Image (cartoon, grey):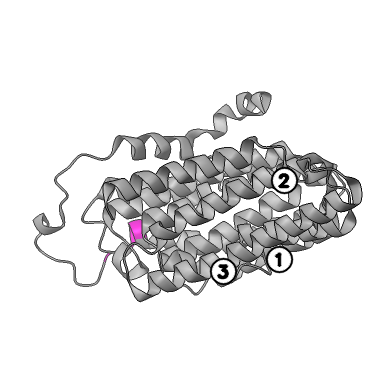
Amino acid sequence: MSPYAKLITSLSLLLGTTITISSNHWMMAWTGLEINTLAIIPLISKSHHPRAIEAAIKYFLVQAAASTLVLFSSTINAWHTGQWDLTQLTHPTSCLLLTTAIAMKLGLVPFHFWFPEVLQGSSLTTALLLSTVMKFPPITILYMSSHSLNPTLLTTMAIASAALGGWMGLNQTQIRKILAFSSISHLGWMSIIIIYDPKLTLLTFYLYSLMTATVFLILNTTKTMKLSTIMISWTKTPMLNATLMLALLSLAGLPPLTGFLPKWLIIHELTKQEMTVAATVIAMLSLLGLFFYLRLAYYSTITLPPNSTNHMKQWHINKLTNTPIAIIASLSMLLLPLSPMILISV
């Protein structure tokens, strides 16, 4: 891919995201989503591999259908109320259609089928963009219209996402698919709380993006794609693999790492809202995710391949660790003691 094409797609991604998160009008928000969709497709299909082309086509079809539903929902609402404002979504049919459309955009259950396949067909850097940056505009639309969403539908989809994300990740051997199901599970945690505390959803998304970026960048540095290669990457970069283990445990939500903070706050808020059953169920379902995170952490650090090479030199990387990885890895592990300051700012 030429540098000019990369520059155009990167600027388009930035522009689309900025338009959506800063707009109050439904047409502008829809325009930003469309720019984002069209900008990421060349990045998905740039390898020209049949799997990458298939992933790009699947992504385009799903996102086009979701954008149509967003437009349809806002048009029905404007027809009945005369309002094009994002915060004035009051018509019941429009609310239902918008929830469905955003669930498709994010990959919530039962509209999750495209997400693992698209991530598997993309490179690690594109998969990182799909898991973090591309989720930001739909989360923002949910945030803006959170007061008019259907609580029962969102809670049902959230618990189903947490369950399926944990369950389907158990028998995967491809790391990108494992991280896709991890993303679906985390989106369940974000969706269940958005009606009651939208700012907590944004905080959860920021911390999830931080931890996921750490994992993807480390995997990209060690060129690890599946569980069988993660075992031999230990001889390449021992320190990076140890960092990867801690980042994965942070994603699992274990204290005293950063990932414990959002889960603790979400369970606390659900209990305050007298949703003790939902809080208990989603907390129990996070144990499924914990299992495959522990398996990844075990493979990355503790397990050695049965016939390791005698020549350490050929696995050695002769360059210093990337500074951005060092910074975001530190943040993805050490923010829990700063939680009072984070909560005051939120």
Of helix, strand and loop, which one carries label 1?
Answer: helix
From the viewer's perspective, tell me whether residue 93 is left or right of residue 329. right
| Any part of residue 93 in sight | yes
Residue at 79% over, 43% down: 84
Q: Earlier in the sequence, mark 3 or mark 1?
A: 3
**Cα separation between marks 3 and 1:** 23 Å
Badge number at residue 61? 3
Q: Earlier in the sequence, mark 2 or mark 1?
A: 2
Quadrant showing the N terminus: bottom left
Q: Which residue is mark 1?
A: 160
Of helix, strand and loop, which one carries label 3?
Answer: helix
Q: Which percent across, then down, holds residue 48?
A: 32, 69
Q: Which percent across, then down, holds residue 195?
A: 79, 46
Residue at 43% over, 63% down: 176
Mark 2 and mark 3 in contact (Cβ < 8 Å)?
no
Residue at 29% over, 66% down: 229
What's under tag 3, amino acid-wise? Leu
What's under tag 1, amino acid-wise? Ala
Residue at 30% over, 46% down: 4
**Cα separation between marks 3 and 2:** 21 Å
**Cα separation between marks 2 and 1:** 29 Å
Q: Which residue is mark 2?
A: 26
Q: Which percent across, then down, holds residue 241?
A: 32, 51
Magenta residues span 300-304
| Any part of residue 284 in sight | no
From the viewer's perspective, tell me whether residue 90 is left or right of residue 200. right
Predominant SS along the magenta part = helix
Q: Is residue 336 above or below residue 4?
A: above
* Foreground pick, 158 / 21: 21
